Image (cartoon, grey):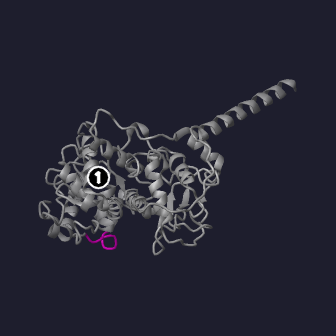
Amino acid sequence: MAKAKRSGLVLVAVLAALAALVWWLNVRGEAPIAAQRSGGAVDAAAIARGAYLARAGNCMGCHTARGGAEYAGGRGIETPFGVVYAPNLTPDPETGLGAWTEAEFWRALHHGRSRDGRLLYPAFPYPSYTKVTREDSAALHAFLQSLPPVHQPNRPHELRFPYNLQASLAVWRALFFRAQAFQPDPGQTAEWNRGSYLVQGLGHCVACHSSRNWLGATNGDDELGGGLIPMQHWYAPSLTAGHEAGVGDWSTEEIGALLATGFSPRGTAMGPMAEVVYRSTQYLSAQDVRAMAVYLKALPQASVEKELVEPAPADLMRLGAKVYEDRCAACHGDRGEGVAKAYPPLAGNGAATMESPNNLIKAVLHGGFPPATQGNPRPFGMPPFKQVLSDGEVAAVATYVRQSWGNQAAAVSALDVHRAR
């Protein structure tokens, strides 16, 4: 009996120590919020800069529901753990940020903690925003406080147990999050460092272009190494591998064109990336676009050994060739050569021959629609074939594209297509 009691006390002590450790890991580095009043006159230049930074961070993309008021929240972000609803960022004092001080807003960006002390879910990408400078945070706060207030109560998240518990989130943060400041590399140019700041911070590129573990944390050992976007089934290709989306052999002009217009001689933005270009990067200054291009071009490129690809069955290739002739050749050419400034070539197209066939399948099913931008206001699009092609036909034409005109990639199965639907 005494032994059992001692064991119980030891267990309680261990649990208390672990709880204390988790608490400390969640508050380390946080300074007390000084007493501060919200509101007051704000410099117009700060508001303008904040508007620009909100574009750079694509804040509207999540914090504006379809058909809703800008920045008023309500959009549901689907995750493997349930739905997280983006909150109201307008300065409404009851349902928005009207009562928030600049220091409280900074704490949300830098530490992932709300005004009332609650921990924020990382669907709000504070693991990236933690690198945003205090000056830029203040400008963002000034801009959001200048918006027309919209009274729209925030929807409660719909997360499954135990992911809906603050205690579970505290453990996640203790394992995977640490507040940090952006550290310029003294061995690089100011332009490279600016690009690094935008890509790592407000751009939060790692949120899509990185694999995630079973608890939803990004893989820190392979940042920007590519990953399947949860719930969307688009594959955000690796930015550190030339056979996917690494741009080490692109010119900075080609990279900049893709970011600014959604179209480049070397590639076209589609799917989630098209939305990023449409809502965000097309509005960046030429200097910032070039800085991002310089940084992305300089990323170390992983060397990948090309594996031998088993040829697809002849009947699958024949069906794929027939579908391609009927549905695709008129735009992409008989030999996948494409049309300059209109339809991308499929011969030698890394997006079509990546290990993951998801993006090619999604394009065939749902169509390919580059963003309409200032630099490319009337892009050529591709119609969806979801309603007219069976899973087997989509698999066949995708396989044909991946194994024709010198392309070498694994065949696509009807099951792959079914999963992507």
384 magenta-colored? yes
In the rendered image, residue 401, in percent from the top left (x then y), is placed at: 21, 57
For the record, the magenta segment spans: 382-389
For residue 4, side relative to residue 67 (left or right): right
Name the residue rendered at 60%, 50% in the picture: 119
Residue projecting furthest to the bottom: 67
- Residue 288 in view of the camera: yes
272 magenta-colored? no
The answer to which quarter of the image holds residue 304 is top left
Magenta stretch: helix, strand or loop mostly: loop
- Residue type highlighted by circle 1: Asp
Q: Is the C terminus in the top left, top right, bottom left or bottom right quadrant?
A: bottom left
As drawn, 225 above or below 236: above
Q: Is the N terminus in the top left, top right, bottom left or bottom right quadrant?
A: top right
Taking depth in this image into account, of 420 and 7 the one nearest to the observer is 7
In the rendered image, residue 382, in percent from the top left (x then y), is placed at: 25, 69
In the rendered image, which residue does mark 1 sit on? Answer: 288
For residue 204, side relative to residue 379 (left or right): right
Name the residue rendered at 61%, 63% in the picture: 156
Taking depth in this image into account, of 318 and 162 the one nearest to the observer is 162
- Residue 349 in view of the camera: no
Name the residue rendered at 26%, 52% in the picture: 287
Q: Residues within 10 Å of mark 1 (few under 14, many from 20)?
A: some
Taking depth in this image into account, of 194 and 234 the one nearest to the observer is 194
For residue 363, side relative to residue 40 (left or right): left
In the rendered image, residue 355, in percent from the top left (x then y), is placed at: 30, 48
Disc 1 on helix, strand or loop?
Answer: helix
